[in-house]
Image (cartoon, grey):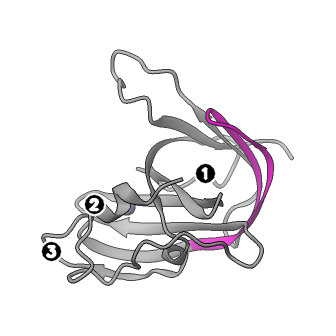
């Protein structure tokens, strides 16, 4: 796990976002979703895995029921401290705009691989079993960082 990409994109003299330090929370299973009103409003899903927050940008409101599936685009790993971050990233900086914590809690990992994550989420809004499945690259989505995020039967 590396925070190199996170550091590279930010100027810590200008943004109040936390600096990049790899550490572990007390329990090691932090879950958070931040509502990020950048150029495009989106939701940043973050899960503590191996001392960093693995992160996905979800363009629409995260699924609260089993009927909704959301695209989740994997983004750079974030430092653990980021789970507490709320504030306004200044104009001209990467991700400029308001960040608010939309949901927070913990998760239990049932399965974690490079292509599939099955977890139980204990948040205020999201509760129960969720899946993140990596999509195969297609003609339309060549990046290979596209995942599907959805609620499954407990
Ligand atoms: Mn974001």
**Mark 3 neighbour density, 10 Å: few (under 14) some (14–19) many (20 or more):** few
The disc at residue 126 is none
The count of marks equals: 3
- Residue segment shown in magenta: 103-122
CA neighbours of label 1 inside 10 A, class few (<14), some (14 to 19), many (20+): some
Q: SS for tag 3?
A: loop
Residue 147 to residue 102: above or below: above
Q: Is residue 136 magenta?
A: no
Relative horizontal placement of residue 65, taking residue 77 as reference (left or right): right
Q: Secondary structure at mark 2?
A: helix
**Which residue sits at x=34%, y=15%?**
139
The residue sitting at 53% across, 81% down in the picture is: 84
Would residue 139 be found to the left or right of residue 101 on screen?
left
Query: Residue 91's mark?
Result: 3
Residue that lies at the very extreme toward the right in this rendered image: 154
Q: CA distance from mark 3 to mark 2?
A: 17 Å
- Quickly name the residue at label 2: 8
Say which label, 2 or 1, has the lower sequence index: 2
Q: Residue 7 in the image: state x and y as whole percent.
A: 33, 65
Identify residue for label 1.
Answer: 63
In front of the other: label 3 or label 2? 2
Q: Position of residue 119 (x, y in %)?
A: 76, 50
Give the CA separation, mark 1 to mark 3. Answer: 30 Å
Other residues around mark 2 within 10 Å, as few (<14) / some (14–19) / many (≥20): few
């Amino acid at each position: 796990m590396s925070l190199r990409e996170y550091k590279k994109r930010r100027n810590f003299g200008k943004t109040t976002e936390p600096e990049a330090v790899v550490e572990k929370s007390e329990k090691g299973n932090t879950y958070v979703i931040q509502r990020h009103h950048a150029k495009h409003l989106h939701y940043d899903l973050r899960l503590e895995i191996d001392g960093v927050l693995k992160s996905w940008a979800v363009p629409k409101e995260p699924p609260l029921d089993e009927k909704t599936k959301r695209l989740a685009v994997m983004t750079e790993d974030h430092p653990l401290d980021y789970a507490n971050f709320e504030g306004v990233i200044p104009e001209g900086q990467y991700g400029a705009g308001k960040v608010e914590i939309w949901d927070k809690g913990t998760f239990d990992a049932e399965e974690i691989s490079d292509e599939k994550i099955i977890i139980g989420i204990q948040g205020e809004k999201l509760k129960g079993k969720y899946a993140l499945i990596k999509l195969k690259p297609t003609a339309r989505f060549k990046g290979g960082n596209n995942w599907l995020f959805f609620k499954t039967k407990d």
